[in-house]
Amino acid sequence: MRMLTFANRNAKEIIRDPLTLFFGLGFPLVLILLLSAIQANIPVDLFEIAHLSPGIAVFGLSFMTLFSATLIARDRSSSLLQRLYTTPLTPLDFILGYTLPIIPFAVAQSICCYLVAIILGLEVTVNILGAVLFIIPISVLFIALGLLCGSVLNDKQVGGICGALLTNLSAWLSGTWFDLELVGGVFRKIAYALPFVHAVELERAVIRGSYADIFPHLWWVLGYAAVALLAAVLLFLRQMKKGNAT
Amino acid sequence: MDAIKIEGLSKRYGDLIAVDGLSLCIKEGELFALLGVNGAGKTTTIKMLSCLTAPTQGDAYLHGNSICKDTAAVKTLIAVSPQETAVARGLSVRENLQLMCGIYGFESDKKTAKIKELTALLDLKEVIEKKAGKLSGGYQRRLSIAMALISEPKILFLDEPTLGLDVLARSDLWDIIRSLKGKVTIVLTTHYMEEAEALCDRIAIMKDGKLLICDTAANIKAVAGTDNFEQAFVQIVKGAGK
């Protein structure tokens, strides 16, 4: 009950921010339309809709990191968290309250992304439903990264780290915009040591209906999500114990 | 009966001693001020008493509950209105109050009654549907105090409640704080001498984490040998540095 009240408040804060709607829902759609237009004029395998749309669906989740990080950082800077620390809300209430409301946004975003992809020629199969479902564990990874950043950074730093650095990193290292095999070397090794390309490969495998190919990518995503969530919880608890909301 | 009993409370951040062996008692229903210049240890004291930060040494008992051992019990007794205006800026005034009612697990009827009562007490009726982030500083402080009062606390901590407010908004807030006198034990920190003198039953003056004096405004002036409370404060604080 307490957690749901807090989660409901967080959902309202996110919905009422017009930038959320633009970046969360609009920007990935603009990208998919733009890259499909390029594909129509200069055909590139990478930008074929069945290959491109899973990448855009995952890239869109980097904005979920930004939303969760901004929400926590703002609550810390306004001392709202300090007030809430003195209430009966438990650490679990805080973590779930910040995480759960963002998952429906992530799912809605991927539904919008795949709907536009269908309009642009993606074959309608039950695999799209599977791709939307597999967005949930991937979104937990991105939300946990946001919780982690929001627990240690202020709202301005969050804009720089999550808004610029993380969105770019998750884009470059995901194999969505260019083929990582073409770059090769250390860059490729780094990309495959991080979860972003695995998240994209996972979604691509589901869209293809090659469910055997979701491994080992799913393990990479789940592993990173677990580590990020644990780190976020520990950092949040540390802030809470210090009573240092700001 | 003592609402708060502080025994040798200290807080150290590395080499910095923020609060140094503070001991005092605050009676139930008392309006008590912690006064001091920047870095005196006022906010740290409130943070320790409200279980936001653990003391390095000593303990305090709120209605008999230790801030070190019985934090869950202490949290049911207290409410805090922090120094910065701690409201959910994207929610309306009503939604902010509903948020606090929900966190304290109020049923629908109690929630409605409590919001009605507090909007009347804090004079928030005309802004009830406005977003908190769009309110003036004075209204945001009123909302902050209303949110603190939702849980019907026995002890209310107000950290610099009138900081940055204009004269009229401050006067309005003083009236509100006066109206709470006797109903709830209030501990407020402030930089404003006239605020402490006008509102509070007793005043504790702190410097560098140490308690210099704790008495009524009249007795503090008598000790300093002046009729002016601000002069008394300056003399006591400067005298402690010699």
Image (spheres, rainbow, N blue to C red):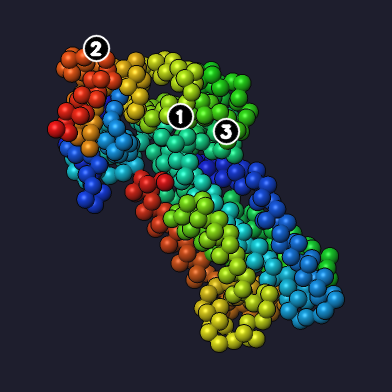
- Whether discs 2 and 1 lie on one chain: the answer is yes
Is tag 2's residue or tag 1's residue first in the polypeptide sequence?
A: 1
| Front-most of residues A217 and B147 | B147
Number of numbered tags placed on the structure image: 3
Horizontal side of residue B166 vs B49, given as left or right: right
Query: Residue B164: which disc?
Result: 1
Label 1 lies in what chain?
Answer: B
Query: Residue B132: which disc?
Result: 3
- Disc 3 from disc 2: Cα separation: 42 Å
| Front-most of residues B148 and B45 | B45
- Whether discs 3 and 2 lie on one chain: the answer is yes
Query: Residue A126: which disc?
Result: none
Query: Secondary structure under badge 1?
Result: loop
Query: Secondary structure under badge 3?
Result: helix
Which amino acid type is shown beneath numbered disc 2? Asp
Is tag 3's residue or tag 2's residue first in the polypeptide sequence?
A: 3
Q: Residue furthest left?
A: B242
Which amino acid type is shown beneath numbered disc 1? Gly
* Numbered disc in front, either 2 or 1: 2
The residue carrying mark 2 is: B227
